[in-house]
Amino acid sequence: MSQERRQNTTLMRYEDVPKTYDQLLAMHPLRPIHNDVELEQATEMIDILAGHDLNTDQADYLDVLSTLVEAYESTYYPVGAPAVCGLDALRALLADHGMSAADLARLLGVHRSMGAKLLKGERALTARHLKMLSERFKVSADLFLERQNMIMYEA
């Protein structure tokens, strides 16, 4: 969205919002959202309308627009999706604590080559490993669990 368009939309007051459904459609058509720019534009319209005493046309428009935003967000930004994958979280924790793959292997009580394999994603953490990491770093074991297709190997 251009800076000018952003300023016009952001600075719009509720009092300036069209009162009829057709006028609202002319201002911001109701179409499926395909990218984050369209999401931002739709969200700005929702922000302008939300919290006001809307007429029937405005309420219907807001309802449909909210449904379109929800559909896009549930596809591209699902609630509860981890912001960081477990392997990245483990790497970050080790870096924060100045630990290497060999240190990880010692912590888990496995052969030192296993530390490197775990960090490369070639091996997965076992339940015992998760418990040990959780206790050592004072984090929930869930932090390490969202990796897809995790195969547990006992070391």
Image (cartoon, rainbow, N blue to C red):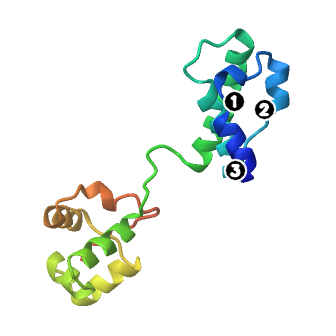
Against 101, is 74 above or below?
above
Looking at the rendered structure, the kind of residue marked 2 is Leu
Identity of the residue drawn at 61% across and 46% down: 75
Residue tagged by mark 2? 30
Label of residue 65 in the image: 1
Identity of the residue drawn at 83% across and 22% down: 23
Does the residue at mark 1 contact the one at mark 2 (Cβ under 8 Å)?
yes
Judge whether residue 35 can be spotted in this image: no
Is residue 39 shown left or right of residue 90? Answer: right
Which dot, 1 or 3, sits closer to the camera?
3
Looking at the rendered structure, the kind of residue marked 1 is Leu
Is residue 75 shown left or right of residue 30? Answer: left
Label of residue 37 in the image: 3
Q: Nearest the camera: 84 or 22?
A: 22
Secondary structure state at the residue bearing disc 1: helix
Q: CA distance from mark 3 to mark 2?
A: 14 Å
Q: How many marks?
A: 3
Is the residue marked by circle 2 packed among few (<14), some (14-19), or many (20+) residues within 10 Å? some
Q: Where residue 105 appears, x then y in whole percent?
A: 21, 82
